[in-house]
Image (tube, grey):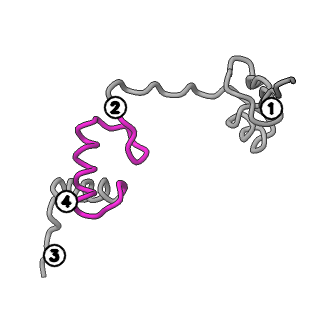
Amino acid sequence: MKTKTPPTQPTPPPVKPCKVKGCGRPNYARGYCQTHHRQFLRTGKVSPIRRYRPRSPGTLKFAGLRLSPQTVEALQELAEAEGLSDGAAIAQVLEEWHAQRSPKPKKPRG
């Protein structure tokens, strides 16, 4: 008696690179990467795009920002203690920083 072989998933075709010379990002639509495709839809032509900015070593992504691990830890502690979201904790710290740096408004004479 023959043993049945379990069905296998078909291998997906290899992802082609963007057709813009030197781009190398994965194909998204019409042969372009997502950035070039949006550029084509917006302007009707494509041009070179800047490379991704290299990440600074020793940083973590937190609420869309690259911060040091110590800063991330402090913000997470603040957010948890105050019951805030990550973004609200950052906003609170920035507001306090700005209040300390800003000169006090002068009272009008009169």
Kind of residue indicated by mark 1 = Pro
Judge whether residue 31 is colored magenta: no
Q: Image quarter for residue 103? A: bottom left
Q: Image quarter for residue 99? A: bottom left
Q: Which residue is mark 3?
A: 108
Which mark lies nearer to you, 4 or 1? 1
Q: Which residue is mark 4?
A: 99
Q: Residue 95, relative to residue 48: is it above or below?
A: below
Which mark lies nearer to you, 4 or 2? 2
Q: Which residue is mark 2?
A: 59
**Image point (76%, 23%), residue name:** 14
Kind of residue indicated by mark 3 = Pro
Q: Give the Cα separation between the discs numbered 2 and 3.
A: 46 Å
Kind of residue indicated by mark 4 = Ala
**Image point (13%, 82%), residue name:** 110
Q: Which residue is mark 1?
A: 7
Residue 31 rendering spot, x and y as whole percentages: 81, 30
For the magenta stretch, what is the residue range?
60-87
Q: Residues within 10 Å of mark 4 (few under 14, many from 20)?
A: few
Residue at the extreme bottom: 110
Q: Residues within 10 Å of mark 3 (few under 14, many from 20)?
A: few
Residue at the extreme front: 1
